[in-house]
Image (cartoon, rainbow, N blue to C red):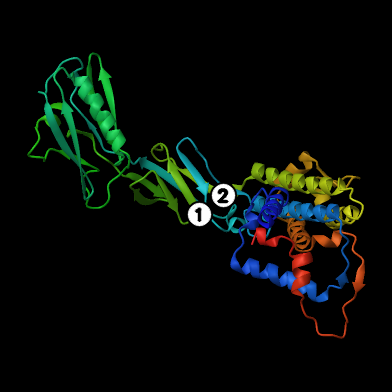
Amino acid sequence: MAGISLNGAYNHFIQDYVSKDVTQADAHRKDELRDVYKSIARLNKKSPLYLLTDDDKSRNEAIDIKERARQLQGSIIGLNNQTGKSSLNHSSAYTSDEDKVLASYIGKTPEEDVGNIGFDINVTQLATPQTNTGRYLPKDSTGLPAGNYAFDVRIGQQDFEFQFSIYNGDRNIDIQDKLEKLINKAGIGLSANIIEEGGRSALQISSTKTGLRSGETSQFEIFENNPDLQKGAVSYLGLDQVSAPATNAHFSLNGEEKISISNKFTVGGKFELQLKDTTEFGSTIHVGVQNDNEALKKHIHSLVDNYNDFVKEASGAHVEKFKSDKLKSDTVGLAIQHMSGIEDIGIKLESDGTLSIDDELLSQAISGPGSKEALAPINNFSDALIEKTKEISIDPMKYVDRPVVNYRNPDSRDTSSPYITSEYSGMMFNNYC
């Protein structure tokens, strides 16, 4: 009977209290967990002894607030793609001709790189794969006798053997179709397809990789080697006929000649380039870093939406002994502290404590020459929200009406109480840690 009761309590806890959403804020490192523990212990050293009434509604509301704060923290950190600090540095690479060269920014110092780094590129040759085009044969004719055949494919230092059978009545197109499926299914870095011309067809085989490394002469070779099986299929089908050898990409960066085995490569740890076409003789394409204004606007809108949702949820709590007004005033107070700066970029505090955005003013602030300085207040507001959510998560019970039984003796040595930690501050923190 006791086991049944325990299972019921456990299932109730799982369904009602355990977080349904795990966010980046929950992916704690060891040092972050240590900081959480230290924060709880530090809080309890100064905390008086409170009397908690047996009020399930208040406790449940405190748990819900803890969850909302944790989710708000996770949302902000997820937007910032950081581990606890906000960042409005949305940067992207650009090229002067994206039809020929695409660029992505992969650097780690966007504030330093925007407008300060870049280069000119000229593309004279793209990297290409090796292609073997077989003989064009009458599709409905037969040419190979029935029997068991095999051929080998050498890619780098590895050999792969393909065995297949030809039956009486198999036409050329049947054999080509069989080998097309066999090669594509193998997954060894080759792709095959049948090409047709009038009433004739050929099997075309290409490497999935491009270019040749130093010392290589081909991406792959096809030959017959098995003495126990019939031969002649490679020469009959023309599988070993190289119609287009693999080539490397040739380009210049600021006039310096470069070679790459792939059309996709990185430059200086700052850019990832994708070559799509050659450039005209004597012309160059410029590559640089710029602020991604659209991504930045989306970031700020998401930040404001997350803040507004939290304020509305705090306003909706109407449990008698739960201090929802204090929770709302603490959160709105953060916005008020930062209003002098964020109003200038179009963010306005409404009468209900929520924020609204003037998109025209925000766009002007983002695209203006002093955008970095103009956006600093919203960056600070984001940091303040993260710190506030951490504070609420550690001690949500401060928003519950709890009479003080005994204050700490100011003259005594501060010591932490594990019972207070587990009962108040660390409420269900083991779910995330």
> Can the viewer see residue 191?
no
Q: Earlier in the sequence, mark 2 or mark 1?
A: 1
Of 15 and 234, which appears nearest the observer? 15
SS at mark 2 in the image: strand
Q: Which mark is residue 289?
A: 2
Question: Tag 2: Cα neighbours inside 10 Å, few (<14), some, or many (≥20)?
Answer: many
How many neighbours does mark 1 have within 10 angstroms: few (below 14), some (14-19), or many (20 or more)?
many
Relative placement, left or right, of 249 versus 175 is right
Q: Give the mark count.
A: 2
Residue carrying label 1: 270
- In the picture, the quarter occupied by the N terminus is bottom right
Task: Find residue 357 and name its label.
Answer: none
| Pointer 2 with pointer 1, Cβ within 8 A | yes
Nearer to me, 367 or 42: 42
What's under tag 2, amino acid-wise?
A: Val
Q: Which mark is in front, 2 or 1?
A: 1
> What is the quadrant of the C terminus in the image?
bottom right
Left or right of 225? Residue 92 is right
Q: Position of residue 377 (x, y in %)?
A: 77, 56
Which percent across, then down, holds residue 18?
69, 52
The answer to whether one can see residue 162 in this image is: yes
Q: Is residue 257 left or right of residue 374?
A: left
Q: Position of residue 229 (x, y in %)?
A: 10, 35
| Secondary element at image label 1 | loop
Rendered position, 166 above or below 389 = above
Considering depth in this image, is 298 or 235 the residue closer to the camera? Answer: 235
Residue reaching furthest to the front: 1
Between 186 and 13, the residue placed more toward the observer is 13
The residue that appears at 32% across and 39% down in the rendered structure is 208
The residue shown at (63%, 49%) is: 90
**Amino acid on which disc 1 is placed:** Lys
Whole-Å distance between the Cαs marked 2 and 1?
A: 9 Å
